[in-house]
Image (cartoon, rainbow, N blue to C red):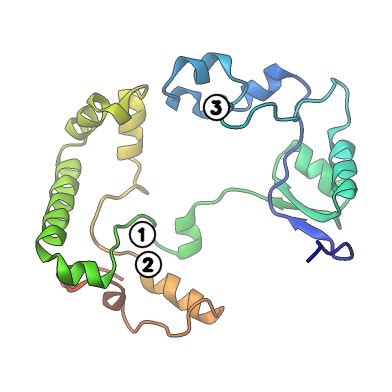
Amino acid sequence: MAMPTDIGIVDLGIGFPYTSVEQKMHSYDFFRANLKDAQSQKEMEFPVEYIFKGVPDIVEEGTDVVEWVVEKMDAFNIAIARVGLNENGLEAQRRYPDRFVLGMSVNPNDIMGAPSTFTMLYAPTKFYDENPKTYAAVLKALQAAIAFINSDKKAAADVFLASEEGKGWKLDDIMEILNDPDVRFTTSPQSMMTYATFMADVGSIKVKPKSWQEMFFPDIHGIPGN
């Protein structure tokens, strides 16, 4: 089946080109300190250039980047584009209000109304039933690790920095993350019913669970959660 030509595309993530390599590299300064190798920090135009090579996102200085993007949208039948809430995005939306919508990052806690769990461990029920000792060992190790982090964040940061994953990180950066009140280490599921209710309302799931416990194995049913 051929791609339809009479339906305009809605692109949920279009960026504007840079007018110099220096401008492009500067746009990644906000997390450059977290990069772990010298090549990504100093040589590459952007951190994942080893995967994406020759990205055509640099145009001649003086180019009207808004018009440049509109030309590309027309060429590829893109009717509407979501762009960042920045100087170029605002200008694009001002010129073409019917073709550009603005997007921005927000604190998910503001959307959910409370902290929410977004990273968790999961396993099929079959595995849980057939491997109770393995499951119990993993849960016990997770609980011990969480208790260790919450009781001594500096010691936890030191362990991370000494690991392979910690190479290139700085202690201050790790401590900033660990001390962020919005970052929580816990086995207590949070805002799961908010997720479930929304998914049921929009039809993503057919049956809404009656409680968060229905979504988790019995081993943690007794802890506070929602």
| In the image, residue 171 above or below residue 132 | above
The residue that disc 2 covers is 191
The residue that disc 3 covers is 47
The residue that disc 1 covers is 117
For image coordinates 30% across by 50% down, the residue present is: 184
**x, y (%) of residue 88?**
78, 38
Residue 224 in view (yes/no): no
| In the image, residue 177 above or below residue 171 | below
Task: Find numbered disc 1 in the image and state the secondary structure of the residue it sits on.
Answer: loop
Q: Which mark is residue 157?
A: none
* Disc 3 residue type (three-letter): Pro
* Disc 1 residue type (three-letter): Thr
Asked whether the beta carbons under mark 2 and mark 1 sit within 8 Å of each other, the answer is: yes
Earlier-in-chain disc, 2 versus 3: 3
Front-most of 24 and 175? 24
| In the image, residue 40 above or below residue 139 | above
